């Protein structure tokens, strides 16, 4: 199976703080699946490192109160193109991210409070039939792999 994966989960230094961390459980999937790394924020034109951002309704706002919704939407669209190009039907994405969060995201107040919701990319992938999961729950989701 071809699986889209947040590049930061494969150790690529593309997170907002300029870091990445290889997730052993995700890396283990390379033995049986083809992983396609993506970073929607970079595909949307944002730098690394970058000011932290959170999703607030339909907008993505940085901690400095800058609206970066357009960059997140552009990155989501580019990520969807790659998913379709490679024939991915699943995506394992960085949890709580305003782009990649799948099911739980930060609430937009920068207080670390979480709410039910999806990041911009995860939402677009789901709307286009690509199942998403976070790095801590993909293995336990029945029928995901």
Image (spheres, rainbow, N blue to C red):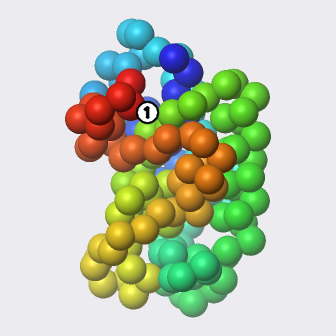
Q: Quadrant of the C terminus?
A: top left
Position of residue 88 measured from the top left corner of the image (x, y, whole percent): 61, 29
Question: Image quadrant of residue 105?
Answer: bottom left
Q: Is residue 113 above or below residue 65?
A: above
Note whether 107 is above or below 47 in the view shown.
Answer: below
In this view, the residue farthest toward the top is 31
Q: Residues within 10 Å of mark 1 (few under 14, many from 20)?
A: some
Residue 140 location (% of width, % of height): 23, 35
Residue at 67% over, 75% down: 68
Report the residue marked by disc 1: 10
Q: Nearer the viewer, residue 128 or 49?
A: 128
Residue 48 visible in the current orientation: no
Residue 68 visible from this viewpoint: yes
Tell which of 44 and 16 is nearer to you: 44
Residue drawn at 37 percent across, 54 percent down: 95
Image position, residue 99 (x, y; %): 54, 60
Residue 89 lies, with reference to residue 63, above or below; the image says above
Which structural element holds mark 1? loop
* Residue plotted at (37% across, 19% down): 29
Identify the residue at image location x=51%, y=75%.
55
Q: Name the spot of residue 125 as percent of width and height, x first.
A: 60, 48
């Amino acid at each position: 199976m071809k699986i889209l994966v947040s590049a930061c989960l494969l150790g690529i230094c593309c997170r907002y703080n300029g870091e990445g961390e290889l997730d052993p459980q995700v890396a283990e999937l390379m033995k049986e699946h083809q992983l396609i790394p993506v970073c929607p924020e970079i595909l949307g034109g944002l730098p690394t490192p970058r000011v932290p951002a959170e999703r607030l309704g339909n907008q993505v706002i940085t901690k400095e109160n800058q609206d970066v919704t357009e960059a997140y939407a552009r990155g989501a669209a580019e990520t969807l193109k790659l998913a379709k190009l490679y024939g991915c039907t699943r995506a394992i994405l960085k949890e709580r991210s305003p782009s990649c969060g799948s099911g739980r995201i930060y609430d937009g107040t920068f207080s670390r409070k979480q709410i039910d919701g999806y990041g911009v990319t995860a939402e677009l992938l789901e709307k286009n039939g690509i199942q998403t999961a976070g790095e801590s729950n993909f293995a336990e989701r029945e029928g995901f792999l």
